[in-house]
Amino acid sequence: MRRLYQLFLTLLTLFLTIAVISVITITSTYFYLEPKLPEIDVLKDVQLQVPLRVYTSDNKLIAEFGEMKREPVSYNEIPETLIQAVISAEDENFFHHPGVDYKGILRAVVHLIKTGTKGQGGSTITMQVARNFFLTRDKTYIRKINEIFLSLKIEKELSKQEIMALYMNKIYLGHRSYGIAAAAKVYYGKALPELSLDQYAMIAGLPKAPSKYNPITNPERATIRRNYVLSRMRQLNYITQAQYDTSIQIVDGARIHSAIIEVEAPYIAEMVRGQMVKQYGKTAAYTTGFNVYTTISDRMQTAANHALRSALMSYEHRHGYKGVLSHHNLIADTPILEQVELLDNFKPVGHLKPALVTAIVEQPEDSASEKQKPKKNKNKQSAIILLKDGSTPYLHWKHIKWARKYINDRRTGPALKKIEDVINVGDIIYVEQLKNTDYVLAQIPEAAAALVSLNPQNGGINALVGGFDFYYSKFNRVIQAKRQPGSNFKPFIYSAALNKGYTTATLINDAPVVFKDNYLEGFWRPDNYSGKFFGPTRLRKGLIKSRNLVSIRILRDIGINYAINYVKRFGFMENELPKNLSLALGSATLTPIQIARGYAIMANGGYDIKPWFIERIENPNHEVIFAQQHTSVCSDDYPEETCPEDENLHALRVAEADNVFLMTTIMRDVIRYGTGTKALKLGRKDLAGKTGTTNDQLDAWFSGFNRQVMATAWVGFDTPRSLGRLEFGGTASLPMWMSFMKVALKDMPELPLTPPENIITVKIDSETGLLASGNSAKTQYEYFIENTEPKRTSIQTGSNTTSGSTNDVTNEELF
């Protein structure tokens, strides 16, 4: 008995000694390490790495930049079911322990004593937060001890809800998704509240091993892990047996979802990205979580995308088909999956989709669009095509017959008689889908295009499309392509002439002339495109008909230096303007956005505005850290509430109101009687604009506006060459502009063009520009700046006119 007592005392002494030594060791270790532990305060204001996001002015997502996909959420935004799933999988006592799972640590110690190796040590959610925010992932004893002490410290200073929110937002869950909200978007394309119980369990199972249990790369293991999480939820009574039984039977449908881009505007997104990197640096721009709101309109940008692509498709149809992408010899009964694999090397470009021709059949064209009168062409052939999604729509003859063989930009081959003249079974082609779901044979356009729209009141960019497909060509033609505007530049020369004393009725001789031009090193014999000459021509008519010789004589008369100094008012730089008479024909090399700015100044009545595209920048908490201070036009043409209170932000007048008014009436007549008459189909009377075509049809332009919206459209090749015969501004670019403006101006009321007080109306002789008389064969009313109207009466009769025009303006009123 005495021996047992002695043994008990020995063991008790040993236990107490170990306990005291342990307490001293732990206390000493704590006091040694505590000063080196990081401050927990930083967790209260932690800056998680969040990507840069770009939005339209109406809050639609345009783009997302950054390696880490993350959408921070507050604790109250986390569904309770997901919280239950996570603690079931990771830390069932989270809401009860002090930050450390002592039982788990004890198990790890026992495991170490028994095996001599380190094992899993009961890492709590709090410990994972400590490790993820402050420590490395190295498995060392010192790191583990630091983790324990740091967890205890975190629990003292933060609530359980704050710790859980930090954990849920920080954890890596695979495929570049950080945090639960990002994982929900990446794997299921849904917001957190939209997920089902089985999906919550799948996400909750990812933190343990995001690659091993990933539903994309390892679906079988991921399903096992998901079902384990569901079983733990059932054991802890978070779900019923019925919910468990149902959920484990569900086949997971996870797949990679990119950010849900709501508006396609990659060219403007790239402009924003470049500006943000320049302003904040690459790292900060991509990880701070900036939200950038642009001036882009969702509705107008979508219309611009469609308008540009439609214009280029129409151009391709006019110039012939360049051939299929490739050909494969299809064997009968080839499995669909193998056929789809043939399309793997071909990506969608713009709105075009790659397709495999699988059959050519006699198939009645029964689409809704065919409910029309029978057509002469009785070809009932159709091709059956296979798309990447496995669907097999028809490609009807009427959508193939355009594809005459391309010979060059001026010639195509003979009309097609059957489908096999252009495509055959086994061919891989591109197709585009129409609104009525029909498909059309297509090809990637070699020609390029650009479209930009500005708000004339303040210069904000409404829409910008720099090419057919940003990912096919990142060259932004709106801001980077310097091209000759041709006749699109003439309005600025005519405005200079009005400023120097010309009137809209001034006669300029449209006749052959030879110039000796020192800048052009020799003689120059310009002519009109038609090759005809029309004699004395009123200034108004010279611009309406875009007469080259009239423009050249005007520039020669007012002086090149005078003209250059004047057109600088519209934002053009002197060093970009040639100092010779070719300036009258638009020989300067300018970008579409420079032309757009000049026309916007015309559109707003003559006030200087500059294009801009970033409206405001917000931090991750949606606090505004930058708001664009832009100038705006404050005039009777625009609502008073849109005028800034700060007078320094009132746009300055750079062109006289009477001058701009006269130019606007002339450019309205361009649409009513001149080279822009196609635009009459829009059914509006408040539109003004001008076409532009350069020598040999290298470039085709149209710029036009009303008081609310202006837009510039350009078509050409990136490496300049002729667009082809008859490809003018009115043919290639005007339809693009019209398609855009039809949508942009929808529901916008027409605003009257009010003459300034010093504008008067006088009845003149249409041939001489003088006051009308009883002998005048044709007369019309014309606007003049007061005291510039003609003083003499025309004595000319209709029989001795020198004008060769056959399309004079004869109506009694201009509007």
Image (cartoon, rainbow, N blue to C red):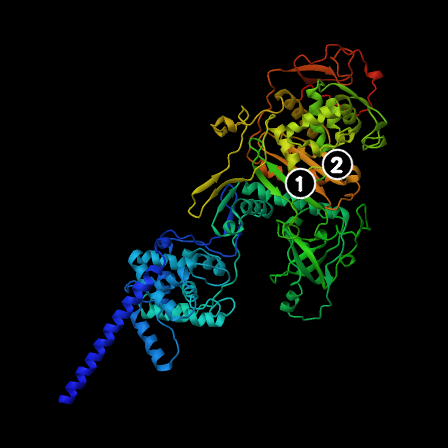
- What is the total number of numbered labels drawn onto the structure image? 2
Q: Position of residue 675 (x, y in %)?
A: 73, 32
Q: Position of residue 182 (x, y in %)?
A: 46, 57
Instruction: Please tell me which residue is depicted at 21% across the width and 82% down the height of the picture.
Output: 11
Q: Can residue 436 be seen here?
A: yes
Instruction: Please tell me which residue is depicted at 35% across the width and 59% down the height of the picture.
Output: 164
Q: Which residue is mark 1?
A: 736
Which sits in the foreground, 765 or 790?
790
Q: Which residue is mark 2?
A: 693
Placement of 623 over or under 576, stated as above or below: below
Q: Secondary structure at mark 1?
A: helix
Task: Write down the quadrant of residue 502 in the picture.
Answer: top right
Q: Mark 2 or mark 1: which comes first in sequence?
A: 2
Callout 2–callout 1 Cβ contact below 8 Å: no
Q: Which mark, residue 784?
A: none
Which sits in the foreground, 722 or 666?
722
Q: Residue furthest left?
A: 1
Horizontal arrangement in the rendering, residue 239 relative to residue 260 (left or right): left
As measured in the structure, the alpha-carbon distance from the residue carrying label 2 to the one carrying label 1 is: 15 Å
Horizontal arrangement in the rendering, residue 452 relative to residue 646 (left or right): right
Task: Write down the quadrant of residue 38 in the picture.
Answer: bottom left
Amino acid carrying mark 2 in the image: Thr
